[in-house]
Image: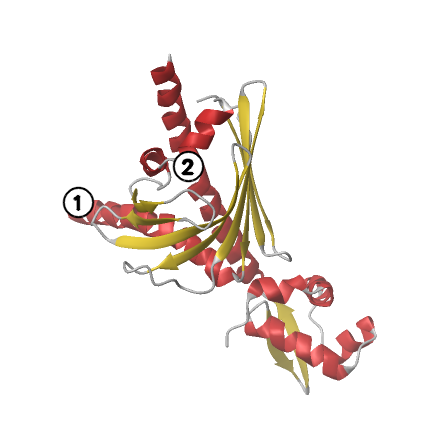
Amino acid sequence: MSNSLKFDLTVDKAAQKVYISREFAAPLPLVWDAYTRQDILDKWWAPKPFSSMTKVMDFEVGGRRFYAMVSPEGMERWAVQRFTSITPKTNIKYANNFADKDENLEIPGSDWDITFSEESDITTVRTTIYNESLERLEKMIEMGFREGYGMIMNNLEELLGEQV
Amino acid sequence: MKQDIFQAIADPTRRAILTLIAMQALTPGAMAERFDMSRQAVSKHIKVLQECDLIRPKPMGREIYYHYNPEKMQEMDHWLAELRKLWEARYNQLDDVLLTMKNEEK
């Protein structure tokens, strides 16, 4: 894709918020679908080599998305997004909690606020994540990334080890 | 209970203390003087900063000097870089998905 699509990520330490803004070269309805339809969400939400597996998607206020990030070894990390506000093609708010496979929520969680806007065929998605603690934020990374990265590094070490 | 680094640096007085200590190690007495605070108030701030390892005590003679620990801040930077990578990877995948969706619509 074009490199001119803007990406911005900032952490407001005092407010304990993460702001993420990203432009997409697609009309807003497509981006909205990618965020709200289970089959499409599962195609991109988990950074490779993880995969996203949505078990329940009930996209309405009071509804929830119950999903797992699955590692290549098949390890599942579950999370629940409970939708607290939906303004079609404009905004989604949800409370996010990590959970076990039986949907028992871990406290504390984080509050997500996602806003969609479109200008001259470019759709901008602005996300605000409020976390109660740094530990919670760190866990957010572990969930999707750290293990995957660690795995890659381990594989590399194994490869290098074999050559010694 | 481990102190939360976010909460530790959310306080403007603690940020000011950190800024000052980053330039020069200080005793609690010197801090109290600089910020026109009671020793008791300074002790509380020191406790919070020390518990999350942002500052470290070093006895010199009969005084204790507090030093800034830059590694802790680097840890934060490292963590931030990982967060960026996660979102970049996620959104690059979304770019591909959107491209496929656009082509399917045609």
**Can you give x and y, in whole percent of width and height, for residue B3 in the image?**
55, 71
* SS at circle 2: helix
* Residue under label 1: A163
Q: Which residue shows up at 28% across the image and 60% down it?
A: A102
Depth check: A58 or A119 in front?
Answer: A58
Q: Quadrant of residue B65?
A: bottom right
Residue at 42% over, 57% down: A97
| Front-most of residues A36 and A129 | A36
Give, as a three-letter code, the residue at label 2.
Answer: Thr
Q: A77 above or below A159?
A: below
- 10 Å neighbourhood of mark 1: few (<14), some, or many (≥20)? few
Q: CA distance from mark 2 to mark 1?
A: 47 Å
The reply, left or right, for residue A60 in relation to residue A77 is: right
Q: Is residue A29 left or right of residue A100?
A: right
Q: Seen from this angle, which residue lies furthest bottom?
A: B62
Whether residue A138 sits left or right of residue B59 in the image: it is: left
Task: Name the mark on residue B22.
Answer: none
x and y, in percent, of residue A75 in the image? 24, 53
User: Residue B32's image quarter?
Assistant: bottom right
Disc 1 residue type (three-letter): Gln
Assign a secondary structure to mark 1: helix
Q: Chain of mark 2?
A: A
Percent position of residue A156, x then y: 25, 45
Q: Disc number at residue A36?
A: 2
- Left or right of B100? Residue A156 is left
A74 and B52: which one is in front?
A74
Q: Are marks 2 and 1 on the same chain?
A: yes
Q: Quadrant of the N terminus of chain A?
A: top left
Q: Is residue A27 above or below residue B56?
A: above
Position of residue B105 measured from the top left corner of the image (x, y, whole percent): 37, 16
